[in-house]
């Protein structure tokens, strides 16, 4: 009898263990994604949130009001938030690369990720580029405030971004008789921010027109900065507009404001005697997963300005 009870007890314990194992939750990889993409997305979302950016990767409809995703510019004037944006861009590149990889679907090959998922990732990449450009400008003040950048989607002028210099900086410009010396009104750090912000938003180069001023080049002309804000927003419009035509107009209106901001940056730089040049965009062969993480052609590094889709 005792032996029988012991046997029943052992069987009950084994059955309990089997049930427990069957009910244990295993890591889930969402359809149309990959473990690598899921991990990178969580890290990107964490860094965006730390930078003060709200995220909604699972709800494309929330992007019908894209203006709501830009925080107050002054909140970006922090080194830690700029670093968060940098890490978010790096992780979002990984997500985009994974989602763009082609997998077999029936008799054909299609990108692993859905149209909406890929569109959302491009939107957040473009947004991250914009916010990092703003952060770099506001952090470059050395030591007093130089750049005054504000954002108001309800502005009566219909222009959401304003970009000015402080009265003190303007007074220095006004007292400079030779326009070739205008860039010297700005510190080296401030000139670098002007150059980088233009590259991040529009993938254009900028430099002081005078050869006598110490040359500076963009510090964001390479991974993880493979494209520009405008490039990613255009991709977001293409993909999300196909997913939901009602999203196209709101995203296009948002992109129009980014275009105006780009124009403002270029116009100001020219007025401060910087030479600016938009780079020729080369038609890119449709293997997008290559240039997200591997900007090389024939084992030769390919700068982003030559590896783009026109």
Image (tube, rainbow, N blue to C red):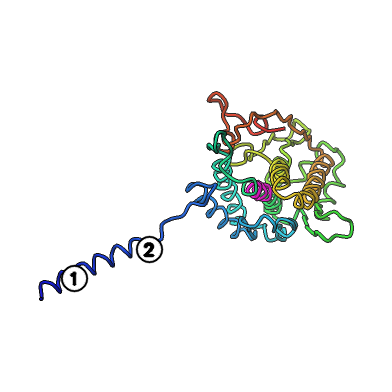
Disc 2: CA contacts within 10 A as few (<14), some (14-19) or many (>=20)? few
Q: Is residue 130 visible?
A: yes
In the displayed orientation, state which residue is furthest to the right: 157
Using the image, determine if residue 298 lies above or below residue 183.
above
Q: Residue at x 64, y 28 (%)?
A: 285
Which of pointers 2 and 1 lies earlier in the amino acid sequence?
A: 1
Please identify the residue farthest to the bottom as the structure is shown.
1
The magenta-colored residue range is 119-129
Q: Main secondary structure of the magenta part?
A: helix
Considering only vertical position in the picture, is 80 above or below 101?
Answer: below
Residue 27 in magenta stretch: no
Question: Residue visible at 62% across and 53% down?
Answer: 82
Quadrant housing the N terminus: bottom left
Q: Which residue is mark 2?
A: 23
Residue 243 versus residue 300: which sits nearer the camera? 243
Q: Nearer the viewer, residue 134 or 239?
A: 239
Residue 284 x/y as whole percent = 66, 30
Residue 92 x, y percent position in the rendering: 58, 47
Q: Position of residue 162 (x, y in %)?
A: 82, 54
Image position of 271 (left or right of 219): right
Q: Which of the image's four quarters has the C terminus?
A: top right
Q: Nearer the viewer, mark 2 or mark 1?
A: 1
Residue 8's disc number: 1
Q: Position of residue 32 (x, y in %)?
A: 55, 47
């Amino acid at each position: 009898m005792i032996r029988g009870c012991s046997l029943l007890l052992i069987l009950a314990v084994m059955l309990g263990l089997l049930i427990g194992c069957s009910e244990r939750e295993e890591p889930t990889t969402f359809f149309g994604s990959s473990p690598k993409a899921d991990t990178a997305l969580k890290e990107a979302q964490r860094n965006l949130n730390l930078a003060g950016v709200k995220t909604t990767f699972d709800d494309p409809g929330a992007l019908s009001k894209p203006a709501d995703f830009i925080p107050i510019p002054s909140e970006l004037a922090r080194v830690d938030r700029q670093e968060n944006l940098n890490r978010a861009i790096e992780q979002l590149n990984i997500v985009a690369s994974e989602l763009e990889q082609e997998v077999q679907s029936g008799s054909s090959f299609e990108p692993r990720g859905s149209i909406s998922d890929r569109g959302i990732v491009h939107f957040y990449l473009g947004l991250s580029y914009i916010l990092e450009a703003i952060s770099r400008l506001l952090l470059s003040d050395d030591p007093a405030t130089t750049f005054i950048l504000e954002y108001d989607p309800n502005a009566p002028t219909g222009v959401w971004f304003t970009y000015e210099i402080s009265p003190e900086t303007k007074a220095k410009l006004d007292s400079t008789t030779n326009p070739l010396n205008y860039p010297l009104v700005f510190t080296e750090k401030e000139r670098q921010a002007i150059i980088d912000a233009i590259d991040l938003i529009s993938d254009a180069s900028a430099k002081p027109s005078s050869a006598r001023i110490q040359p500076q080049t963009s510090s964001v002309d390479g991974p993880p900065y493979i494209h520009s804000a405008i490039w990613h927003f255009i991709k977001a419009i293409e993909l999300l507009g196909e997913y939901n035509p009602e999203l196209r107009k709101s995203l296009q209106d948002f992109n129009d404001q980014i275009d105006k901001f780009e124009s403002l940056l270029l116009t100001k730089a020219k007025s401060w005697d910087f030479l600016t040049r938009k780079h020729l965009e080369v038609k890119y062969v449709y293997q997008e997963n290559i240039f997200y993480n591997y900007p090389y052609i024939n084992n030769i590094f390919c700068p982003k300005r030559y590896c783009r889709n026109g």
